[in-house]
Amino acid sequence: MFFTFHLPLAFALVYFVRFIHQRVSARRILRRIPGPKSCSWLWGEEQNLYYDAPGAHYLDWHRKFGKVVRFSGAFGHQILSITDPRAINYILGEGTYQFPKPRGVRAWFQILLGEGILWVEGKEAHERQRRTVAPALGPQSARNLTTLFYENATRMAIQWHKFLDECQSDELTIEMTNWAGRFALDTIGRAAFSYDFGCLNGQPNALAEALDSLTNHEKTRWTFYMRALFWLVPWILHCGKKGQLIRKTRNELGDLVLDILRDAKVVNDPNSKTLMSLMLRANKSAIARHMDDEQVAAQMRTIISAGYEPVSATIAWLFYELAINPERQQAIREEVSMAHDPSYDELNNDFPLLDAFLMETLRIHPPVLENHHQASETVSIPLAKPLPSTSDLHLIIPKDTVLSIPVNVIHRDRSTWGPDADVFRPERWLERNTRNNRDLFTFSLGPRGCLGRSFAVAEIKALTVTLLRQFSFTCQCDIERFQTFVIRPRVVGESPSSLPLLVRRISE
């Protein structure tokens, strides 16, 4: 009895002592790094980051303290926010496998999606999965699927025309975030798996509702606790209403992808260009180690999630910017007014105004605000500039320190983008001295960079071309940024994401 009672207590005491030792050691090593004074001994800066405007504190901190900022999370664990370009290149390039995703982030992906490419760590394991998935998401795949992108865009436009006909009007307020999600989900379903989720028919959809309810929610106290603590205790993701939503969404995704996988194996079309077919063929090749059905299903769940949240958020922000910039909207409409649907190569090369507008949307409204990593060991990384009051061009990062790379700060760095870095100005992409799109961090970089960049850009451009030819857009509401899993727009004062746009039919 004595042993049974005291053994768990001994383990808890050892864990507590180890926790305190790590915190004290990390603070000592990182003491030279400037940053804000912690506003709470219990929560650190987590409350400010959660409840205040997305990304605002990162901008203030970096403009005040420099390229490397230290701040506290819950229970005093140390977080480094890094925008130093040389450090980022090392973390995401040469040293990428020394800086895996934090344990809490990996737990989120494992519970929700399975052990797919967003979860996997380690050079060999990641490269093996990447070889299997990459052919299905590259430029050639996007080129083959461009016609499908136009088909879905046209289906969406047809639904809008039906709504206008039913109300016997040439203008109607349409909830753009809702339709952006419908388009993104149906497009990834058809392109990846030859499966029509049926979102563009305008009817309720169980998968769309499950995905939306998981992330598009008002900021509750329990959600804050989970967000603040999952860095330290990932098992909290199993608890409460949020844990139930995660399991519900996993079940919706799981049942669906296993059905799709079985159907794809039965059809076994050697000429199919869908992502599912390409992935199955890559899985059979000599360079890829065979994956079982659950591993393939994990990749499928990952592709659906990645093709839904960031893409739909970007579409919503792009049409918001079009709606509040009528002159630019008309200029792009005139640029894309041609007799045929542009090919993949034409979309990439022949429409500089459209391309500049999309690049600026991605710069000002990156869908993912922070890129998180965790030091797997104590490591020294290079710096482009020394820390304040030092001459050292290297930074020691203690083991288990969480790193945040704030995308919005990189995208608004005045030394890169000029004094008007905070202003939405697409023309900067057309100017001779402007940096190329490598300065965009939206898709990350290095071996862990986004594989679906070409796919996402092509589908967004195809939708924009299709809708601008048939409709004009106006926004009559005040819109603010709203952080869920991604950064979405919402009407000021409302809880979930929302973007009501006045859509007018253009007379032919």
Image (tube, grey):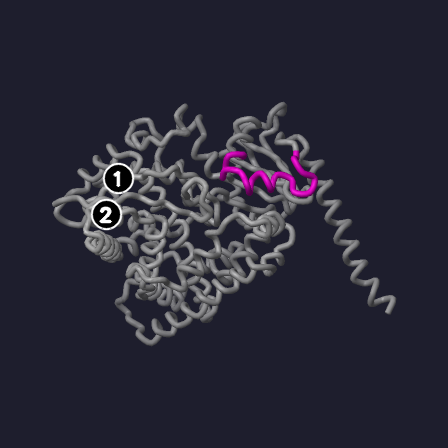
Q: Main secondary structure of the magenta part?
A: loop
Q: Earlier in the sequence, mark 2 or mark 1?
A: 1
Between residue 432 and residue 205, name the one nearer to us.
205
Residue at screen point 28% across, 69% down: 270
| SS for dot 1 | helix
Residue at screen point 26% across, 41% down: 473
Q: Position of residue 345 (x, y in %)?
A: 23, 47
Which mark, residue 208? Answer: none
Residue at screen point 30% across, 48% down: 174
Disc 2 residue type?
Leu
Q: Position of residue 156 (x, y in %)?
A: 26, 55
* Lateral position of residue 83 relative to residue 44, left or right: left
Name the residue beneath numbered marker 1.
354
Residue at screen point 28% across, 61% down: 201
Name the residue beneath numbered marker 2.
467
- Eye-nearest disc, 2 or 1: 2
Disc 1 residue type?
Leu
Does the segment drawn in magenta span residue 51? yes
Between residue 432 and residue 322, name the one nearer to us.
322
Residue 28 vs 432, above or below: the answer is below
Give the residues drawn in magenta, as a range: 38-57
* Lateral position of residue 488 relative to residue 79, left or right: left
Residue 311 vs 90, above or below: the answer is below
